[in-house]
Image (tube, coloured by chain):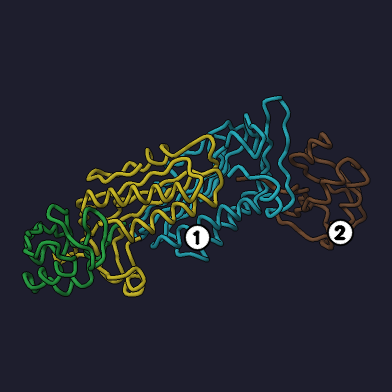
Chain colours: A green, B yellow, C cyan, D brown
């Protein structure tokens, strides 16, 4: 399935895109998505390791299983305030 | 009440909005853009948010504050876009019956906002370079260099 | 800055007065007249001060705050005379480089003001009776009945 | 010597006066002033026990020696804020 992943801040600047499409097997986990994303955008790997992944607006662990249609985003360490 | 906005934050209206005749205490916190972050001179900041998730997290913080303290009103606003030195980036106001509760509730709200809400700032230096601030943990962030507030 | 006044406290101006480009944090505390103190319904309060001593103690608190925290500005105003429910009786605002310092400094200032500054309030009930509040110690005051802020 | 003592809040209401004049020996202490004041205004005794005495705008202990011309005030437990 194709997962559309939203990117923000330095992560977006590294790729030049607000959204990247990543191909993963049906039912893939967030951990698998991370590996696919790192393979697709090698420059993003070091920030990706320090970033969270949000599914439908909540941070999830790497064993979380994805569904087609999930809203997925990479969340670099935040710096609001 | 919580809000993300690209307009200047009307923190006077925010303060008034939490006042309540049952509450003897109001505490307001303002985070403002400093001219220096550590050794680095800042000329302006850019703030961006992952809007829907930021609003969900702000709603969760508001619910948490109301659960933990006998709050009359709680109001949180974060500004996005370009901010200059002296501008208010975030404002939190709370009213409670007694003052200890108001201090604790506002401190909790701003600390949790800074930890959990997906908002990022880019520091723009006088030489034209800009850098997204992405320290990896609150603890190491404090050690490595001071925050803006 | 500190002041005793019989006029309404302009806490918006007070907040603005402490803002400082070197300071990333502003904290404002407002004490307001509650409609209830414990079980007692309050219709209005009278505040009186021993003016010269109150000003001396406020000056000492300001100096203490500046000694203990890297304060940009600190401002304290206490109102005197008749105050109605909802009126602001006291306002304290502080700016500091970082937020922890601002919360601590304001908390210290209001706690110390309530402990040391010779100001007294009389609670006036709906039946026309009035009673000066003269609890003997902060600890027993907290236990016996809640303060107004 | 005659010490003019300022009174506030309930202490003033008890006596009806903003200032009372108390006669004490030259060089009397604040403790002696308290006893003279209590003798002069018996109604004020119980609040006086719970009150401080300020000399020239600072609270002082009972062994503090008074001078003619000192500004003296009884400070009932405060309730500002």
Query: Mark 2 highlights which residue?
Result: D29
- Mark 1 and mark 2 residues within 8 Å of each other at the beta carbon: no
Which residue does the image show at 20% across and 52% down from the upper left?
A: B82
Q: Residues within 10 Å of mark 2 (few under 14, many from 20)?
A: some
Q: Quarter holding the C terminus of chain B?
A: bottom left
Q: Name the residue at 55% across, 60% down.
A: C63
Front residue of B8 and C14: B8
- Give the x, y percent position of residue D70: 78, 53
- Left-right relation of A66 to B139: left
In the rendered view, does D58 fall on the left or right side of A67? right
Residue C102: x %, y % from top left: 45, 58
Quadrant of the image containing the N terminus of chain B:
top left
Q: Is residue B71 left or right of residue A40?
A: right
At numbered mark 2, what does the secondary structure look like: helix, strand or loop? loop
**In the rendering, which numbered label is found on residue C104?**
1
> Which residue is drawn at the image coordinates 12% and 71% (left, top)?
A44
- What is the chain identity of the residue bearing mark 1? C
């Amino acid at each position: 399935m194709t997962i559309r992943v939203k990117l923000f801040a330095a992560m977006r600047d590294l790729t030049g895109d607000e959204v990247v499409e990543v191909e993963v097997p049906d039912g893939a986990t967030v951990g698998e998505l991370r590996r696919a994303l790192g393979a697709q955008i090698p420059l993003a790997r070091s920030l990706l390791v320090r970033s969270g992944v949000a599914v439908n607006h909540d941070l999830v662990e790497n064993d979380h299983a994805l569904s087609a249609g999930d809203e997925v985003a990479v969340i670099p360490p935040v710096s609001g305030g | 009440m919580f809000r993300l906005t690209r307009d200047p934050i009307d923190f006077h209206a925010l303060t008034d909005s939490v006042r309540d005749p049952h509450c003897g205490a109001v505490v307001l916190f303002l985070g403002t853009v400093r001219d220096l972050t550590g050794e680095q001179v800042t000329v302006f900041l850019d703030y961006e948010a992952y809007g829907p998730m930021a609003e969900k997290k702000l709603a969760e913080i508001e619910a948490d504050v109301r659960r933990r303290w006998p709050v009359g009103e709680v109001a949180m606003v974060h500004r996005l876009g370009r901010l200059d030195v002296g501008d208010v980036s975030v404002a939190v106001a709370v009213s409670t019956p007694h003052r200890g509760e108001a201090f604790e509730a506002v401190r909790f709200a701003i600390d949790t906002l800074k930890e959990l809400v997906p908002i990022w700032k880019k520091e723009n230096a006088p030489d034209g370079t800009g850098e997204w601030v992405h320290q990896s943990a609150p603890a190491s962030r404090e050690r490595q260099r001071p925050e803006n507030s």
